[in-house]
Image (cartoon, coloured by chain):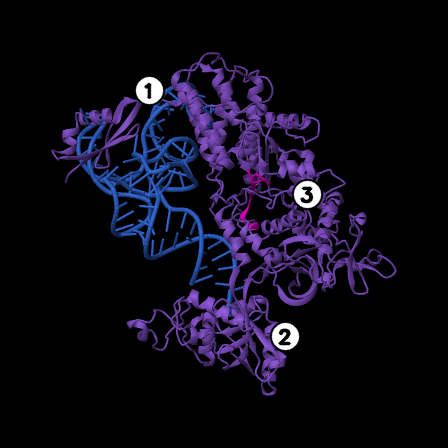
Chain colours: A purple, B blue
Amino acid sequence: MSSSSERRKPYPFDLIEPKWQAYWDEHHTFQVANPGEPGFDASRPKYYVLDMFPYPSGAGLHVGHPEGYTATDIVGRYKRMCGFNVLHPMGWDAFGLPAEQYAIKTGQHPAVTTQQNVTKFKAQLKRIGFAYDWSREINTTDPGYYRWTQWIFLKLYNSWLNPATRKAEPVETYQGDDADSVRLAYVAEALVNWCPVLGTVLANEEVIDGRSEVGGHPVERRPMRQWMLRITAFAQRLIDELDGLDWPESIKLLQRNWIGRSEGAEVRFPVADSQSVITVFTTRPDTLFGATYMVLAPEHKLVEAITTEEQWAAVRDYREKTARKSDLERTDLAKDKSGIFTGGYALNPVNGERVPVWIADYVLLGYGTGAIMAVPAHDERDWEFAKKFDLPILQVVAQAPRTAEFIETLKPLEECFAEEGFAVNSGFLDGLGTAQAKAQMTAWLEAGGKGTRTINFKLRDWLFSRQRYWGEPFPIIWENGRHSALPESALPVRPPEMEDFRPTGTPEPPLSKATAWVRYSENARREVNTMPQWAGSCWYYLRYCDPQNDRRFVGGEAERYWMGGGSQAGGAPRPGGVDLYVGGTEHAVLHLLYARFWHKVLFDLGCVSTPEPFQRLVNQGIILGEDGQKMSKSRGNVINPDDVIGEYGADAFRLYEMFMGPLEQMKPWSMAGVEGVSRFLARVWRLVMEENQAGEWTLSTALKDVPLENSQKRVVHATIKKVGEDIEALAFNTAISQMMIFVKAFTGAEVRPISALRTLLILLSPFSPHLAEDLWSRLGFQGLASDQPWPQYDPEALIDNEVEIVLQVNGKVRDRLLLPREATKEQIEAAARAHPRLPELIAGKEIRKVVVVPGKLVNIVVGS
RNA sequence: GCCGGUGUGGCGAAAUGGCAGACGCAACGGACUUAAAAUCCGUUGGUGGGAAACCACCGUGCGGGUUCGAGUCCCGCCACCGGCACCA
């Protein structure tokens, strides 16, 4: 390794790469104009290709970033050459915990470290030669940017979801008397995820197995007053509108499961000897006759009212124990059910039976109504609980209808039966199949005012405030315990300059220490929470369309052009939105869900022109270390892009990342593999250049302006076809294979036709743009390789006059026949029957059938 | 437990139901060289046969099935990876 840096470079990538990067920069080669701007070409269709912008950490780029970025860069460059106006921007998701934590550790202001990190990241990206339009660079921590993040928050604050129109509307259209209760951004006292180590609350999506996604610190539940966004109002649309998206099914499924729609009914159980009513949610109203007890979440409001005097001490004790448990412990102990009888009873609305009411931590306050009817015969959890506490189990669903087996199935259940079946012991439902029984019971409940058909979602409203310094302040003030919005003219609300922005160690946010800032007026105080990191990334793709606009978050015309759908010149109708979005799968239920939610609100309010932001989504796979393990500092298997580029060049780095395997697949790094593609690029170089006696590179004397031979023509056109099709399909590895075949075909040739090389350089330029550009100019071609129109292939040139037909006997390959390509089925069969080795191959057996696939094969089927 | 995804040479991987292993790495052999590196040419799934060009059999996680023909489609398993996880 030490001598390798002194090793002679296979071609002078160290000279040509900086040269062309500087050239593209100076000439703004990849800048693209907006409608109405000079240089805008309205005749071209648009293509918006987007990367998930990085969080600029102090560690710099890792090899995972450029994997997706190279893929989009290839597509963007290719689409540009195909005649599209391509929007391919980059920016920085720069608010967030790590910057703040680093700042606290080093004593520097996060704005300073963020700026340093951005500078570093940008230099690293430029060194890879990405065709970004850097004039559109954005940074979420820039006041000119977060001003509009705050503006969108005000839109949320000032809107509600009108149930009549099922759309977000200005809150003025709300007729009720408490507008604060319907706003899409609201304050609520809720059980939230409090992380003492980080000193902040976290969204559900940021908590994994009871620990913080950032840092892995324990998270506990506590009730706190926080800002929430009413994402649940959009739950159904967030599910429904996934259908039209060209996303991986697995990501759609993750979102659907996270939103967690379930259909059922709310059923009201009167509490015995009381005015109270316990409302439960169930997906199995058909099992109501089998409800033999009830369970409330320990924190449920009615617990105090229901619990009898004798049971009160035990119940209080249980509640306290539960409260102390973190979510982590609560799930860890999931196997063993626990609970306490309240001493109270409720009445089953379907038959008036008294059922005991328990509390248990397996019932969660946050889902449904926080209370259940327990049907132990037909629910695993209830079964377990009933077994443990010896509660009655009554079968109300049989596995078979009323037939001979019917009696059989009514033997006492030996295990829980949670499937669908046929109602038994259920009065007016008896004999009905589960689906019908559900419908019947729901109708009966509704008719008697005892229940309602209901749809429930697992999705919770989005906890949107954080107790941090390094985030967007809310444009909100408090006066006499009431919140109100600042006017748009007050934006941006900048965070105060603070010496000490450490967390206070209590739920009190650090901004509260900036007393002068907090004091807005004699009576009003500023909101001291800040927004979560996701805020900035919820709409950044919109800002790229018009990043300098200081009157609007994005200009209408720019938004309609880049994000718009409708029909495009000469093409099929397009659904609109970002045309291609590439990034990691880790944002499946975070950024990708939040951004869709914001986008829908903006759409309803008429601020954007499409209901969905990202039409086509592709997840790149994780790159593992050479040892096949996840890259990590502790394993010592981290590959640093800078090292690779230093040794092999950016073109080889790009090409290798694409050659490793399918984009979406997880795959291990291999330095030997980098070396392989580097050799390929050197071969391309030597197709054009040769070394003279003095060791200088000069144009190769084998280059001649001669026409292509037929076989050469075939490989050239096959390569044009395959590379173009493979880029469209994001199958970069096979595109590169084909270019390798191309190069091999010309490497040995004594005379190398210049026209073939010209084509190769165009095809190669999206992948390894520096080399392509350099050889292009050395060959004296006009303009830039990057600006050339993508070549068309000639289908005629692909066809050989003679084709090889495989001769099979009973499906096994026995020989090959060389036949004219226009040979008919009959002629192929005749040729096969005339094959000299045929008698030997069929060993005297009778020919039963002959299958001919013209141009491919002939299969002779013989009897046994 | 539930839901996804993936299993092909020594390794990364190719293959509209039609020649399994393209392309690359590694390995081996040759050319060039005083020598090495670099470069170029060639061999390379396994087993068996042949002096040889070649021939035969086996082979895409495992077991069945559909088909003239299956890595590819269907049914049943196994292993690994990822997500969710008391969601009523």
Closest to the observer, A783 or A17: A783
Quarter of the figure with residue A63 = top right
Report in which chain the residue with disc 1 lies: A
- Mark yes or no: residue A465 visible: no
- Asked whether the residues under marks 2 and 3 belong to the same chain, the reply is yes
- SS state under label 1: loop
Query: Mark 2 or 3, which is nearer the eye?
Result: 2
Which residue has dot 1 on it?
Answer: A801
- Asked whether the residues under marks 2 and 1 belong to the same chain, the reply is yes
Give me the C-alpha separation between circle 2 and circle 1.
84 Å
Under mark 1, the amino acid is: Asn
Which callout, 1 or 3, points at the residue further toward the start of the chain? 3
* Label 2 packing within 10 angstroms: few (<14), some (14-19), many (20+): few
Residue A36 in the figure: left or right of residue A323: right
Closest to the observer, A298 or A654: A298
Inspect the magenta stretch and tell me whether residue A839 lies in it: no
Which residue has dot 3 on it?
Answer: A117
Q: Position of residue A278 (x, y in %)?
A: 58, 75
Inspect the magenta stretch and tell me whether residue A586 lies in it: yes
Tell me what residue is drawn at x 71 percent, y 51 percent: A155
How many numbered discs? 3
Quarter of the figure with residue A135 = top right
Report in which chain the residue with disc 2 lies: A
The magenta-colored residue range is: A574-587
* Label 3 packing within 10 angstroms: few (<14), some (14-19), many (20+): many
Which callout, 2 or 1, points at the residue further toward the start of the chain? 2
Closest to the observer, A376 or A808: A376
Residue A801 in the figure: left or right of residue A292: left
Which residue has dot 2 on it?
Answer: A301
Under mark 2, the amino acid is: Lys
| Looking at the image, residue A330 lies above or below residue A463 | below
Q: Position of residue B76 (x, y in %)?
A: 32, 57
